[in-house]
Amino acid sequence: MTAFQIILMGLLIICAVSVSFSQNLLNSILIYMSFSLVMSMLWICLESPDLAITEAAVGAGITSVLFFVTLKKIHAIDASEPEAKEETENE
Amino acid sequence: MDFICNFPFFSILISLFSGTICSVLPAKAAKAVNRLVIAAVGLMSAVLLLYLLSTGESFIYWMGHFPAPWGNEIRAGVLEAGMALFFCVIMYLSMAGGAHKLPGEVVESKHSLYYILVNLLLSSLLALVYTNDMFTAYVFVEINTISACGLIMIRQVGRTIEAAVRYMIMSLLGSGLLLFGLCIMYDLTGHLLMSNIKESVALIMANGEYQIPLIVAVALMCIGLCIKSALFPFHSWLPDAYGYSTVSSAAILSSLVSKGYIFLLIKIIYRVIGFDIFNSTRIIDVLFVFGLMGMIFGSLSAIKENDIRRMIAFSSVAQIGYIYMGFGMGTQAGMVASIFHILSHAATKSLLFIAAIGLTDVSGGSRKFIDLTGAAYRNKWAGVAFTAGSLSMVGIPLFSGFISKLLFAQAAVQVEGKMLASLIVLGISTVLNAVYFMKTVIRIYTSEQDAPYRSITFRDRKGYTVVLVCSVLLNVILGVSSQPVVDMIGQGLAMFA
Amino acid sequence: MGPNLLANYGEAVSAILFCIGFTNLLLQTNLIKKIIGLNIMDSAIYLFLAEKGYIAGRAAPIVVDGVTSVEAYINPIPSGLVLTGIVVSVSVTALMLSLTIRLYLRYHTLDLDEISMQLKREGK
Amino acid sequence: MSRKKSIEEYQKTSAFRFFRWLSGEEDPYIGNVEMCPQEEYQPDQEAALRREKEHDAILDKVYDTTHNKSLYLFHRLYQATSVLFCLFLIALLLVTVSYLPANGTVIRPVNNEVAERYIEKGLEETGAVNIVAGMILDYRAFDTLGESHVLFTATITVLILLRLNKTEKDEAEVNDRRFEPKNDAILQLVATFLVPIIIIFGIYIILNGHLGPGGGFSGGAVIGAGLVLYLNAFGFKKTERFFTEKTYKWVCFFSLSFYCLAKSYSFYTGANQLHSVIPKGTPGAILSSGLILPLNIAVGLVVACTIYAFYAMFRKGGF
């Protein structure tokens, strides 16, 4: 079990480092998603099933979905005319 | 247990619950609820303060059915009750003073959201003041941060959103460090309640085991709270956040939010680590140096500034430097001076922000100094109030700023190693303060015949004027009859131990 | 160096992860990556806490067959704290992401330095 | 030829169709499933060019070493100090960790009388089989009350940032769906099967919070994820039939009010040493452990609605 934990921790560090150096935003988000999954496995190993369920539902699910929507929104903003969306400063 | 002992709990719960209630109310009703809640909480805190002064000892209130190391609890003493009362007064004044500007600054449909955030902010401040549990403090620090961010960016111009992003990033760094320090502390002591941690910390220091991680944990918590309260090198978010958000937000943020974190730090110093143990570490020297640097550099940036609200914002950086300098002295007198300065700065800064908006209103909304020429003649009350606030900031007798500077000087004289440095920097900083505040005061009292906004006359707003007068009075009261307040602070600090 | 570095390998990993997240939050120019760094930082702290509660050879803190002796279960407190912490970090992430969308709508970039340059150029 | 079937017959078998589909010669769903052709994502060339130019101009200003030396130096200094600070932090934390009590052993400050009582008396005092649930919703309930309000505060700030008015919302919805198929048959089919299962699983996690791993927050997040899947498959038209801003407002209001009032009652009776009238029930039964089950349900409702609200707000600025 200890060996398995150490492997998982190694994976965590690899994921965290590769998030920092990945050029593509989508890739970073996907790597972060796998980071969360590894984390939830680690929590099963550490005998905290409550945390594992929550992390799997939240970290790998909801947070990643929110990241994806943000990325999509940003591309959509890129696609539409900038003038149409220009906000006016009321100063 | 007397019924009054329920008041801290009631005030936290009422303000939390009113946030939920406001989410289904229309804006007008939400505003009424907001005012009512602030007034009610203030009243309760005042009664509690009188009660505590008469009994002369603090009390612990269980949050649940379980006693100390198992359950969660809150604690009320003179200092806590006094702070809560003061926070409510300042918050009421800030909300009332900025109310007339709100329709111009925030979209109509989002007014009720604004009041929700203010209620939640109040509840989190109260919880930070009263709590006796480290993890609860962390949770409410997060509520405080998020609602403060909401208050910054509710006025949706580009600047405020950018400021909000910067504020969030710095704050989250701070919360991360705070939480990490807290976890190490939990690991070393096995407790989360402040009183229990303190016992274990004393044991650890006596045994000599685990001393290094303990010091690191304390340092991490201190740095986290310093970042969150915008101590000098971490202040990059501050000018934009205070300078461009709504008036009430700026007043609340500068005078309350950062003070909430500082008060939590005081609690940690006294109730978690122990004053003597804290003073035997090197951390106070770091705080002292950063405080001094903040005093100088904050004032220098304020002198360079060409925008009145950003100037006031930079002045906050300098004033927070004063507070940390008081911590850094490591004596009881320095701590009393710092706490008094928290009060005096909060009273003065909100007054300055509210008065500045009256001046810019009669200058065509421009905040450049050149356009403010003669503004005090066009809006007399705001001019008088701004002058009073400036005099207080500079440290003229009769105003609260004078007393806090006097206390700082007295405290500095008692400390051998740090006396010279603190006195010199105190002097320099006072001169710099005088330079930029007097420049502004002279500018608003210069009558210029061909000033562009001469024709604008001030529409008399009774509520606004009343708020200004109240703020000035609060300042003068703090300045003239300071002895009872100082005594109360001393009594409160004695109760902390 | 103290004696327990190897025994505390889990904590060491969480310390390293914390610093990676911290560095990301400080140094990345891209806002989305900053937010990911923030999440990594938070997860690292939660890992640290969960390691604190773990005791080798004991079961998860869910009472089985009415056995309520201390020797049977791990420490439940860290799990509770982490549960609270996860909610906080989700809320903060959602807030940061919505701020990102707003900022992008206004300035068409995710780089904070670039935004401050734009602000300087606009003059006001 | 040893083949028993003729070629025509073979062509009618599903194996043949499968191999053809595998090699990409024919789509087996053509004619069976209605599909919307995906539009290619085409960025506006002109706008992109202009933006690029501006971007370059700014970059020139930012990173122009010859004209803007002080700024360049500042950047370098900032980066260097950040890196140094982070390395210092790593070293500091590792040293700290090495001095911490050894992990995994029993004799540590963490395993003191607090954890002991939670484990030994938890079942008796809170009635919850899951000790963690008993701890966060009974012993240390004030934290959890704060936590649910953190979520509430975050929703309010997201509302402030992203809520649009009616006309903007319609426009945003059109923009939002421009680059993706309206009714993706595969997604809809999968969603029809999966969404009920996901939602039932979420409800199970919530209701089982005091008996096993799980609880209000994780269950609510699962339900929220199910709702998001449903929304993605069938669009806002379908979800608006049962979930609008009003629903969200009132569900949130009632759940949080219930939470606040229930906990106020328990705090009040606890602090004033009054007897609480809430029965604990038999441990292990579904209706047991006092307030924990209703509180879990309230939290679950809030979280499910909040997650859906976040998603809808991100997608089109309202719902």
Image (cartoon, coloured by chain):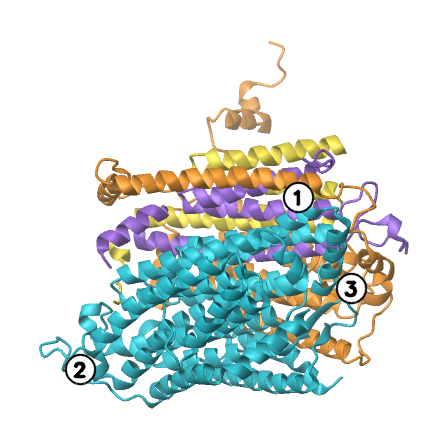
> Quarter holding the C terminus of chain B?
bottom right
Mark earlier in primary sequence (3, 2): 3
Picture disc at residue A40: 1
Picture disc at residue B70: 3
Quarter occupied by residue B239: bottom left
Instruction: Give me the chain that's purple.
Output: C
Instruction: Give me the chain that's cyan.
Output: B
Whether residue B440 can be seen here: yes
The local secondary structure at tag 1 comes to: helix
Kind of residue at disc 3: Trp
Judge by depth and name the residue closer to the eye, A29 or D173: A29
Judge by depth and name the residue closer to the eye, D120 or C11: C11
Q: Residue furthest top?
A: D1
Kind of residue at disc 2: Ile
Q: How many marks?
A: 3
Depicted B211 relative to depicted D286: above or below? above
**Residue picked out by circle 2:** B456
Identify which residue is drawn at 53% across, 47% down: A64
Q: Position of residue A41 (x, y in %)?
A: 68, 40
